[in-house]
Image (cartoon, rainbow, N blue to C red):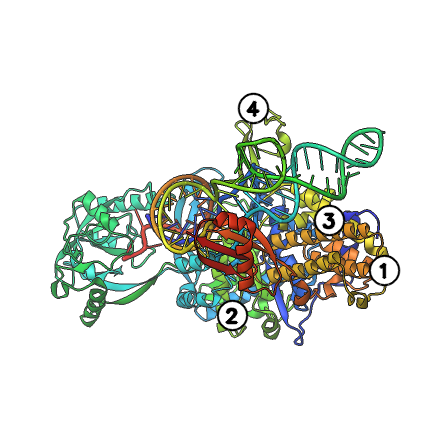
Amino acid sequence: MKEKYFPQEIEQKWQRRWAEEKTFEVMEDPSREKFYCLEMLAYTSGRAHVGHMSNYLIGDALAWYKRQRGYNVIHPFGWDAFGQPAETAAIKEGTDPEKFTRGAIEYMKWQLQKMGISYDWSREIATCDPEYYKWNQWFFTRMFERGMLYRKLAPVNWCPKEDISLSNEQASGGQCWRCGTAVIQKQLMQWFARITDYAEELLNDLDKLEGGWPERVITQQRNWIGRSRGAQVEFRVAEMAETITVFTTRIDTIYGANAIILAPEHPLVQKTVEGKPNRDEVLAFADELIREKRGASVEELEKKGTFTGAYAINPFNQEQLPIWIANFVLIEYGTGAIMAVPSGDERDFEFSRKYDLPFRQIKLTEDGREIWPEEMEAGDESWTVTVNTGQWSGLRSEEANRLMTEFAEANGFGRGAITYKLRDWGISRQRYWGTPVPMIHCPKDGLVPVPDEQLPVVLPKNVNLKVEGGSPLDHVPEFVNVECPKCKGPARRDTDTMDTFVDSNWYYFRYCDPRNDSAPFDTEKVAYWLPVDQYIGGIEHAVLHLIYTRYWCKVMRDLGLVRFDEPISRLLTQGMIVKETYWCPEHEWLFPEQVTDDRHCTVCGRPVEIGRTEKMSKSKKNAVDPIEMIKIYGADALRLFVLFAGPPEKDKEWSDTGVEGASRYLQRVWRVAYRWQGRVKDAAPDDSVLRGELKDYQRTLRRRVHQIIRAITDNFEERLHLNTCISSLMELTNEIYAFEQAVEKNGEVTAADVALAREAIEALIHMLAPFSSHIAEEMWESYGHAESLARARWPEFNAELAREEEFEVAVQVNGKLRSRLFARPESTDDDLKRAALGDEKVQAATAGKDVVRVIVIPRKLVNIVVK
RNA sequence: GGGGAUGUGGCGGAACUGGCAGACGCGAAGGUCUCAAAAACCUUUGGGAUAACCUCUCGUGUGGGUUCGAUUCCCACCAUCCCCACCA
């Protein structure tokens, strides 16, 4: 052990050693309990900043801890390598997406290895590898065969100028992100997964995740699935052979209906207006509404509609209701048609007022007062009483709802129904850089899946990405033109690629068996490792990824590949690293080095605004490259700081001086370890010297060591507030320094001192390993241990040794702190009471008053209540 | 509009089920060492009152409430942020 701490040297040594000795590579071992520690796979954006690292560091700390607790810990990593941004970057840099992505993986992997994160790299996967996406295709064909996938016409955002499809982000504000052209909606045949078939199960199984998943994620998923119980009611269209079905959660309000309103996209709009004098007008208006809706936010969209000229008949009272179309009725929810009840719904109220539709009151409060929507409280329906509603008048709405649904059912014009907000999942993308859909369109045999033995359908290389019209793959004849697997006649390949969420659905199953070439994974291996014990990732995935992957697990279960319902037991949504930003009115975002000390732009000299602290990102120019930090302070200091900055689930603010502080702390640890290293190595471990009578400072150190082991262990097991674990380590270090001072004062170093220092320092080293692994390994080795800390057992705390010998008890009078006293652990409540009442300051504070009550909280506090 | 989160010193943050608010770190001030500086080590560091100590007093976004006791629980409000959003 050198006298001085050289982080880069040590880090290189241990990174090499870990790789050579395969320290973090694991195998299934039924005799040991497993722990699956998983961080979300990395999107291959080019380079990782410290914000990305914080995710991996949380996982690494836990992986280290669990390893030292004796678990068989699988801690894998991989790359989310497909997707639109790689295409964009490739076009910009004049390369192809594959080259760009491989380059990004290489660099980012190097960054992660420099951080010394304890991954089992032998299990690494990249979703753009044909060996991986082959199984996306295999799943696709299995699901197609079982009717879990289907095709339908669906709108895509389309730029008419460039003739390409756009994602929602690329079409935000209704404009093409590249050329600014107004985006149109184009109807294309697209692939959908029937996730709605699993809506009920996805909702119910959320209960199984209680406790392991953050409440807010569960709530978000519940709202996303959005189950509503209500009824579908059929309205005959007058003088036509059509019926309009509406969905309502409040069939009891049907006597208050004043119109039927269709979404402008509703298929019956055409038929309803056919032959009517205003036909062309209405259809044109419907088109306008559809166009306006795109990209507009709710507040700025005024409710608008028009009367079609047709009428529908209320099946309860045979009243004729005008059929309208309006922009606030959504085609994608329920049946795309509603009955408008102004007395029951604020939107209907607003609409009816605007267009002067008739009102009929059907609700009263218990005391007979009429209620209008303005005064209704959302969700509060308990106080309404139904009136003017035929035979159901006078019932409470809940009961009326039930009885009227039954009535509709009995008379054949309605039924109870459940509706979800969750939509079937559109998985088609008209892009190049993704998994090709393994389907063939044959003029004779229709849709034919690519047979297993022909998988993978490999993505062709050297494809022109800047094509006009359709997907780039449409323009690759050798890819498109194939033989039909059934009739061997000429056929066309499907040229859609899959949404990258398909890739991320099951990657962590593949980690269990990453090189399997005959199946996506071996069921038994997955049965050993899964479910994931701890998943760590950003809150932004609360709904999409985390619902899709739950869905996929259930699909795989139904395909007979796995035997459990939920793939992830515990979820931690980590906060972001934020850093302050600089904004120049002329040059927009600036790097910190572009700003002078007195906050002016170095380029134009204008005053610079110190912007809000924001999530680290390239575009805001506030990203910190971990490599830069490693060069100065070493990876261990960076790791320590990132985890120390705040609790994992909260946003944390970046601070340069904070890293420096972490670095100083590590040097402080190093120095104390160095000072004792010689004595510790010379003395054989011998606990017998500790059996004799210990001095105060010795007992104090020992007690603190065991208290801190307990605190850190508990924290890892329960709250995972790693920042306070690090505080505890610092306290332990301070404690050892204080101990050294006492030893020095004592004049000589006894055998007991050495044994105690060893115990304390080795505990410190041990518990430092999850945070700053390299320095911990180095010190551990220099203390005479040949094997990696990764195989050493986590220190056990001794409750007896951790016990306080004396407690400081606060003494309050009427809740105000007046004094303190010291008590032995064995003192009774009565002892404390007597001591408190006898205390001088207490007597001064209570003089002339009557003691009404004395409250004693053992070992903590005495409160004397006086009057 | 709905759902959720957060608000504590100059700063990041502690305080686990109501029980001594401010652990730990950053920053700052002073000291030791040094020719000097850096580093290191040792003190001090929420505000106010007091000559320093003792001590007193105020203090966890604001205003109420429950309680012997509230950063913690309840109600109302303010501020900031996030997610969803005309979901019938």
Reading the chain from its start, which is encountered first: label 1 or label 3? 3
Q: Which chain carries label 3?
A: A
Compared across the picture, whether A242 is left or right of A118 comes to left
Tag 2 residue: A556
Mark 1 → mark 3, Cα distance in angstroms: 21 Å
Tag 4 residue: A606
Secondary structure beneath dot 1 equals helix
Q: Where is residue A412 in the image (x, y as percent from the top left)?
A: 20, 70
Mark 2 → mark 4, Cα distance in angstroms: 59 Å
- The amino acid sitting under disc 2 is Met
Q: Would you say the residues marked 1 and 2 are in contact, meaning their CB atoms lie under 8 Å apart? A: no
Tag 3 residue: A666
- The amino acid sitting under disc 1 is Lys
Compared across the picture, whether A797 is left or right of A282 comes to right
Q: In this view, does A212 lie above or below B87?
A: below
**Residue A198 showing in the rendered view:** yes
Secondary structure beneath dot 2 equals helix
Q: Which chain carries label 1?
A: A
**Residues packed near mark 4 inside 10 Å, few (<14), some (14 to 19) or many (20 plus):** some
Q: In this view, does B7 lie above or below A386?
A: above
Q: How many marks?
A: 4
Callout in the foreground (2, 3): 3
Q: Is residue A648 above or below residue A755?
A: above
Reading the chain from its start, which is encountered first: label 2 or label 4? 2
